[in-house]
Amino acid sequence: MGPYLMRRILIALPSLLGISAVLFTVLALAPGDPFEELATNPNVPAEVRVMLRAKFGLDDPIWQRYFHWLMAMMQGDWGYSFISRVDVDQLILQRVPVTLAVIGASQVVALLIALPIGIISAVKPYSWFDRIFSTLALVGFSLPTFFSGLLLILLFSITLGWLPFVYRADISATGWEWWWLHLKQSLMPVMVLGLFQAASWMRYVRSAVLDVIKLDFVTTARSKGLKERVVIMKHVVRNALTPVVTLVALRMPAVFGGAIVTEQIFRIPGIGSLLIDAILRNDTPVIMGVTFVFSCLVILFNLIADLLYGWLDPRISFR
Amino acid sequence: MNHHHDGPIGEAELECWVAQVRGGQLLRRDFIQRLAALGIAAPLGGLMLMNAGVANAQTAFNYKPTKRGGGGTLRLLYWQGPTLLNPHFATGTKDQEGCAIFYEALARWDTDGNLVPVLAVEIPSRENGGLAPDGKWVLWKLKKGVTWHDGKPFTADDVVFNYQYAIDPATAAVTAGVYSDLKVEKVDSHTIRVVFDKPAPFWPGIYSSSQLIPKHIFAPFSGAKSREAPANLKPVGTGPYKFVDFKPGDMVRASINTGYHQANKPHFDAVEMKGGGDAVSAARAVLQTGEYDYAWNLLVEDEVLKRMEAGGKGRVDFAAGGSVEAIYLNCTDPNTEIDGERASAKSKHPLFSDPAVRKAMGLLIDRAAIQEFIYGRTGVATANFVNNPARFRSPNMKFEFSVDKANALLDGAGWKRGSNGIREKDGKKLKLLFQTSTNTARQKVQAIVKQACSKAGIELELKAVQGSVFFSSDMANPDTYGKFWADIQMYNVTQGRPDPERHMQRFASWEIAQKANKWLGSNLVRWRSDEFDKAFRDSEAELDPVKRAALYIRMNDLVCGDGHVIPLLYRPAVNGLANKLMAPLSGWGTDMGSLSDWYKEA
């Protein structure tokens, strides 16, 4: 296990390096510049823009800028945003709590929906219950979140006027009111993301359980005279969920990465919207920072998923 | 030339009339009428009076609250949130807006483009001795008893510090250009003198409406350490609201400044500025659901705005400013290289060098229809490049849409229709490339123009370039508007301040965008006229505001009359307001600049 872990981490380093090099090059080649807005402002002479570009090193060759960035990064200096002149790590940390809360909640909701429905559907395949929820799941993952989000806004905010559609991270209320206001504003984004995720997980749980339920050891368990409930929960579900756990672990980076589109629609100040803003403003250090965190997480959770798999299923060994 | 000001009436007589208006013997209205009889337009007459120190008949904003505070929380929605709160680093309008909640300037521009004192006691004039007779300096008296949010007094040292802070290259301030060509000097604790390198007819410049930061907070962080100042994110200003909390790009929170220097102001107890999202849903949050009180810069089709206004929760405000959308016919040839440069300033456009073709193009653009069907209230059809303030608007330019006249003109000039219906002359075909940025409204305008042109035997090829490419100054990209490697292009420019100097400079020959200046010159259409250049040079030295305005009107007529520049519409600032919210919004500065005057009706 130890050597395996070491090897995986050593392999991860060059891939991170490669990812950052590709990202940086693509960003540098893309058109646009962070001081674009100054160009259209007649009150700011062109020389000021030229001066700022030089000051922030935007006119240096790409490879030179990349090495500057890399060297600083290795020393733990993430750089600062061209636009807000705030340190990148500070900007990212500011956004993490909201993203964790909203996206995390939506993943929990997704699991709470997907697990029971997926299992029941598999236990009674092709029943009315299964058919109804299979259809709903199909609709669920066919509807993109930006569309279902707008539909919910139209219904609950505009027609009915029950829920706000602008998310506010710092609500000044305290106590129960604080919880109530947060619940109200999180309901729509959490549901949009949760239901979308639940739809695909539901199908996944169903097929995993179906695979196991036909196996001989289940028949044995039943013939021992065990209650159906025990058979399903102890023998079927436990074995069927191994791949599901891996799937959920692989999905975790997204929890940190945020849901870019949904955050934009509901104005949730998460990491996804930070990334979108940074991209729109050509704020290279922030884009690099966020995507770097994201790629680290993907690599990390891939590793965790592999380890989990082996732990859940001892037949798999690490070599 | 437009010799309005050199009418049959003598200077002495004019001054006598002005004195009578000041003394009250002559009504302002009668004065304007007398001038009108002499051929001087009304806005010019008003300018004459203003210059002589006679107060303007302002459309005064009526601030009703009789006590400070009690207005609850004001909720502002910006679809682009401010990313920093130091006005010297503000790269965009959104940042200036965020800063303006806390910081104030010497003065600000009101809705009609007049200067209103904020941290200054009064606006300098010849009457109060604030303006140098030779136009080389301005004296500003500062309000006494103004304190920063931390209780320290606001003095002349602070104003001088802002100048020093900004011009230090190590600070990397965006405002460095604000103070070029001038110096700020302290006269006494509450008086400063702004000294210009050469006579400045437009003496308010930008410095007078630039937000001021406190010396005692920022002095340790001047120059290379500018980025480390904690106050970059926690502003300490003189403004109506004090800092509470800031999350870049997301939220700015402020609470009432109970020590504010204007009586009974401000009205609200707290202000929240939320950022992010898109313009359409921002409009919805104010006009349809009433979740917010104000939404900034609603770049939304008027049809959609009207539908949302029907919700009855809010209204849309249109503040006249200096933005003008225009079509430009390239003066140079984008398809041949001279000395390795396309569209070289040395070349001439093979088709547009014929005045008949330019005139025909002008006749083929249906500005009235473009306003009615595309822009609605968000754009007003115009024949002028300079539209606001009214004192600079030319009465001489007219626009017309007529396919028949365009056809007759081209026939007369010898452009014959070929077998495929496209006109040609001397082997040159009227086939043109028309580029603009990707934007629903602009693509519709392109389609309308193309259709009209095809009826007159001109074939247009339409091209839409992504905005981030089109408006970038990327030297390597061939599709930028600065390069203008096409025959025709269309975009919007802003005047930025209620004076057309910088705006008009876009047509000076020394501003031509070319390889030598990395295409950073502002004359993108590469138009050149000796008469214009001379008029512009004259205007730079003309201290008489009336004669100066006449020069700008003349320049506008030269540019627009020549046909290479075809103005389409001028575009007001579009903002959404809750029904009960009263706010004197101006198209000439930040909306938050007037925040101290905002209130909600009971």
Image (cartoon, rainbow, N blue to C red):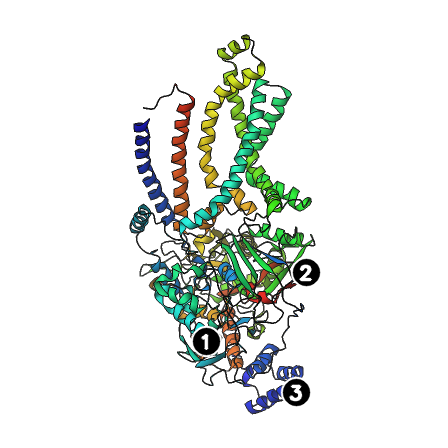
Kindly tell me whether residue A50 is visible in this rendering.
no
Q: Which mark is residue B24?
A: 3
Query: What is the three-letter code of the residue carrying label 3?
Result: Gly
Label 2 or label 1, whichever comes before in sequence order: 1
Q: Is residue A78 above or below residue B255?
A: above
x, y percentage for residue B481? 44, 58
User: How many angstroms separate mark 3 from mark 2 (CA)?
Assistant: 38 Å
Label 1 or label 3, whichever comes before in sequence order: 3
User: How many angstroms separate mark 2 from mark 1 (CA)?
Assistant: 39 Å
Name the residue at 30% across, 50% down.
A68
Query: What is the three-letter code of the residue carrying label 2?
Result: Lys
Label 3 or label 2, whichever comes before in sequence order: 3
Name the residue at 52% across, 16% down.
A213
Q: Residues within 10 Å of mark 2 (few under 14, many from 20)?
A: some
Q: Residues within 10 Å of mark 3 (few under 14, many from 20)?
A: few
Q: Is residue B21 left or right of residue A79?
A: right
Q: Nearer the viewer, mark 1 or mark 3?
A: 1
Location of mark 2 (residue): B580
x, y percentage for residue B159? 45, 73
Q: Secondary structure at mark 1?
A: helix
x, y percentage for residue A75? 31, 47
Out of B446 and B48, give the one closest to the viewer.
B48
Out of B425 and A282, give the one closest to the viewer.
A282
Q: Residue furthest front?
A: A175
Location of mark 1 (residue): B156
